[in-house]
Image (spheres, rainbow, N blue to C red):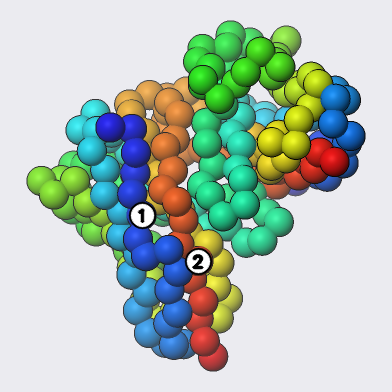
Amino acid sequence: DTGVSQDPRHKITKRGQNVTFRCDPISEHNRLYWYRQTLGQGPEFLTYFQNEAQLEKSRLLSDRFSAERPKGSFSTLEIQRTEQGDSAMYLCASSLAAVSEQYFGPGTRLTVT
Amino acid sequence: QQQVKQSPQSLIVQKGGISIINCAYENTAFDYFPWYQQFPGKGPALLIAIRPDVSEKKEGRFTISFNKSAKQFSLHIMDSQPGDSATYFCAASMEGAQKLVFGQGTRLTINP
């Protein structure tokens, strides 16, 4: 399978715990995006990378959120001190820098209890 | 100005009918308008996309109509099938593969 992959697919955690999600983009894509989607809503942009550089962060990305793409390949999204409001689907997408088509992974469903 | 407004919120169409979903935007700097299809528990899948230099794009049963002056675009699904039942999102972005701004989504149900 050559699409975007995300791991884990589901994560249940208790409030206050830290969680980390991984995204592997399509291999030749140098742009990688993170979005968050709550039930019944469209995805909302969080941040994006071109290669290893983080080029934009949304105001939605509070200080408890950090994203990395250390070698310009896979990316991780960490949420520290999780809150119930962090419960959502976290989506990763990738694209070639020169074109706009973004391809999404299956998402990681986070439930904070 | 970054918003994309989508309607209707939900839509029921008989099998074989035409499904029409509409979106409107304010930011004239948007130059790329994709539509995504999402099934429950899955990530959004790119269906079809258009740029403002054309007024219509067709791929199979899916057509985007684009009205630049009205800042509106719509998705038409011809000969709608039960397998088309899903949530559809319109989106927009500015030049250079920047972030997508999504509409609120339309839950489409095709009755057999």
Query: In the image, is B72 to the left or to the right of B87?
Result: left
Mark 1, other Cα within 10 Å: few <14 / some 14–19 / many ≥20: many
Q: Which residue is mark 2?
A: B107
In the rendering, at what x and y percent does residue B75 appear? Answer: 34, 62
Q: Residue furthest left?
A: B69
Residue B98 position, x and y percent, is: 43, 26
| Residue A72 shows up from this direction | no
For the C terminus of chain A, give its image quadrant.
top right
Q: Residue at x 50, y 66 (%)?
A: B107
Q: Is B110 or A96 nearer to us in this picture?
A: B110
The residue where tag 1 is placed is: B6
Marks 2/1: CA distance? 11 Å
State the SS at label 2: strand
Q: Quadrant of residue A70?
A: top right
> In which chain is the residue bearing label 1?
B
Which amino acid, mark 2?
Arg
Identify the residue at horizontal 84%, vertical 31% (top origin). A15
Which residue is pictured at 26% across the width and 54% down the height?
B73
Does residue B54 appear to the left or right of B90 in the view shown?
left
User: Is A59 displayed left or right of A28 in the figure?
Assistant: left
Mark with earlier residue (2, 1): 1
The image's mark for residue B104 is none
